[in-house]
Amino acid sequence: MVGSFAVVSYAADTRESERMLDQATRLEVTEPDSSARMDLSKQSLSKAVAAKLLPANARSLLRVRTKLRHGEYIWNDEGVPAGNISVFVDIRRQMISVFRGGHEIGTAVVVYGGEGHESPIGKFPIRSKYRDYHSRTYDAAMPHSMFLTNDGVAIHGNVMAAYRATKGCIGLPPEFAKLLFSVAHKGDIVEIAHSVEPGA
């Protein structure tokens, strides 16, 4: 059965992430609505990559049926074969996707760097991992830290709330950070992007 499903889109007014209809990036999927994930057509993936909504290696997405709020996440790797882990963060939509072999296995709402401490854009290998890290600079707990840059930018567990910002890191729901930490390895790629506003 071929259907269509909206790509993940950030709801800026509520600081919550949801899968919303975006006519410019409507995805053609080949799975019935009852399945846990959606396979992407080449055409849909091409559009989503051009809009910086998905990484180029994406093959399928988790089917998210409700709005995700801060602290909520979905993690489902059932039926996904072994493969390399990659991470995609979209600052505009305030969301993260974890892929294994191109198949999304986890997604959550994130917090990111505030004004003057913007999170960097680009592709970064995980340089180091620390299960229980504490920042001496900010006197802050950073559980399940995966460092991306030499100047301290990491993805890590964080207190999650609307309008909360970091000093440049990508903050994750603590349990989601723990799951990501358990599957990610040093050298795995984290891509941080800023997707194109619909209609821009």
Image (cartoon, grey):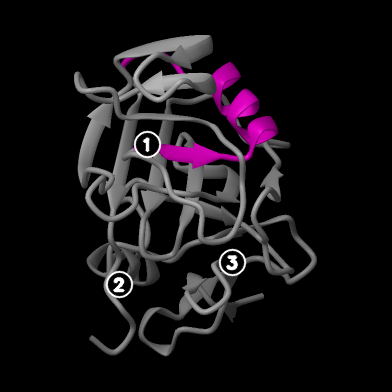
Residue at left offset 40%, top offset 34%: 86
Residue 174, position as x, y percentages in the image? 65, 32
142 or 127: nearer the viewer = 142
| Residue type for callout 3 | Glu
Q: Count up the numbered dots.
A: 3
Give the structural element (helix, strand or loop) at label 1: loop
Residue at left offset 40%, top offset 48%: 112
115 or 190: nearer the viewer = 115
| Residue type for callout 2 | Lys
Residue that numbered label 2 is attached to: 47
Give the structural element (helix, strand or loop) at label 2: helix
Question: Can you say whether 36 is above or below 152 in the image?
Answer: below
Circle 1 or circle 2, nearest the eye: 1
Q: Which label is found at residue 70? A: none
- Neighbours of disc 2 within 10 Å: few (<14), some (14-19), many (20+): some
Residue 154, position as x, y percentages in the image? 37, 28
Residue 40, position as x, y percentages in the image? 48, 62
Residue that numbered label 3 is attached to: 16
**Left or right of residue 6, residue 66 in this image:** right
Q: Which residues are magenta?
A: 169-187
Residue that numbered label 1 is attached to: 169
Query: Which quarter of the figure has residue 126?
Result: top left
Give the structural element (helix, strand or loop) at label 3: strand
Are the residues flagged by discs 2 and 3 in contact, CB closer than 8 Å? Answer: no
